[in-house]
Structure formats: C-alpha cells, structure tokens
C-alpha cells in the first residue's frame, strides 16, 4: 500500500467521495490501495472557497473541517488509473487520455485540470472511522505497515 498527502480540505473531498480524481503534475505507474493523508497545514479559506461554492451548486454538502484530521490518515482508496489530460472531450479512440471537457463542473472545481497534467482515478474510497495521526510526506510514499493495517481495520461504513 502507498500513501499520498493532500492539503485540507482536498483530502476530505476525496474521503467524502466528492472528488473522484486527484490531479497532479506527474504520472505514476502505481495501481492499488492508497492511504489518503491530510497534511498538517491548516486550510486556507481563500484557496478552497470556490470549491465550497461548487459543492453547494451541485446540491451537495461540504465536509466538516476538523483540526483532528490534520496530520492524519483519513481514508483508504484504490488508485485504478493515471491518465494525461487533454483539452476538450476524448472519444473512445483516445483511450490513454482523459478529456478536461468531459469532467463535471464539480470535479473541475476540486482539481487543477490543465493539459499536460495527470488525473489519478480513485475508486472504492472508504473513510476511516477515526483519523490516525502520522507525519505526511511529499509524493507517493510508503506508510508504516502497522499504520496501513490499522487504517484497514478502522474503515467506517460511511
């Protein structure tokens, strides 16, 4: 299992199932379970306010932001694909790419969708019933096996 650290509230957007893709400037060949870790950095309202507006426009509820989540594993997901982004729509013949115009307004608001970047597709996202404290890291990283096992055991039903 790997882990990725995301700033809040983007980690919570993933944990709550609002964000289906993590957008990155770099690709990965890794596929499999991935722990979602919320960085220690407190949320900056000016950065995420447009996200909250997009969530409300979609008729959804934004996740509760809690300091308990900061510096913690908060969800487990499966990283199933990583594809480069293209402007516009992508037809079935362009199978290795993902079209920016094919994304919902909400998905576009919750990520940085630009040609040349990469969309990491996350599925089977499961929130942990209780956040598990641990220092994060940059990039895709290996969490301690004890914490990965604890995260798997503490997955909630919501």
Image (cartoon, rainbow, N blue to C red):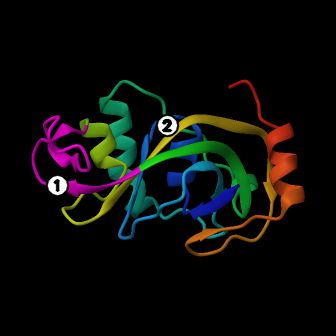
Local SS, label 1: strand
Image spot of residue 98 (x, y percent) = 24, 47
Pick whichever, 39 or 27, lies toward us.
27
**The magenta segment:** 82-103
Pick whichever, 67 or 78, lies toward us.
78
Q: Quadrant of the C terminus?
A: top right
Pick whichever, 157 or 121, lies toward us.
121
Circle 1 Cα neighbour tier, 10 Å, few/some/many (<14 / 14–19 / ≥20) = many
Q: Which mark is residue 62?
A: 2
Q: In this picture, is 77 found above or below 69?
A: above
Image spot of residue 137 (x, y percent) = 65, 74
Residue 92 lies in the magenta stretch: yes
In the rendered picture of this protein, how many numbered marks are placed on residues?
2
What residue is drawn where x is 55% and y is 72%? 139
Label 1: which residue? 86
Residue 129 shows in this picture: yes
Local SS, label 2: loop
From mark 2 to mark 1, how far is it between C-alphas?
28 Å
What residue is drawn where x is 76% and y is 30%? 156
Q: Is residue 63 left or right of residue 120?
A: right
């Amino acid at each position: 299992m790997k882990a990725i650290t995301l700033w809040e509230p983007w980690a919570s957007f993933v944990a709550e199932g609002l964000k289906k893709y993590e957008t990155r400037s770099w690709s990965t060949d890794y596929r499999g379970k991935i722990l979602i870790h919320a960085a220690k950095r407190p949320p900056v309202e000016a950065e995420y306010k447009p996200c909250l507006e997009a969530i409300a426009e979609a008729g959804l509820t934004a996740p509760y932001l809690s300091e308990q989540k900061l510096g913690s594993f908060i969800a487990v997901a499966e990283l199933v694909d990583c594809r480069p982004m293209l402007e516009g729509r992508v037809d079935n013949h362009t199978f290795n790419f993902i079209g920016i115009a094919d994304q919902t307004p909400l998905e576009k608001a919750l990520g940085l969708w630009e040609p040349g970047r990469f969309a990491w597709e996350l599925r089977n996202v499961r929130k942990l019933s209780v956040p598990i404290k641990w220092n994060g890291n940059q990039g895709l990283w290996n969490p301690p096996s004890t914490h990965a096992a604890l995260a798997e055991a503490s997955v909630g039903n919501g």
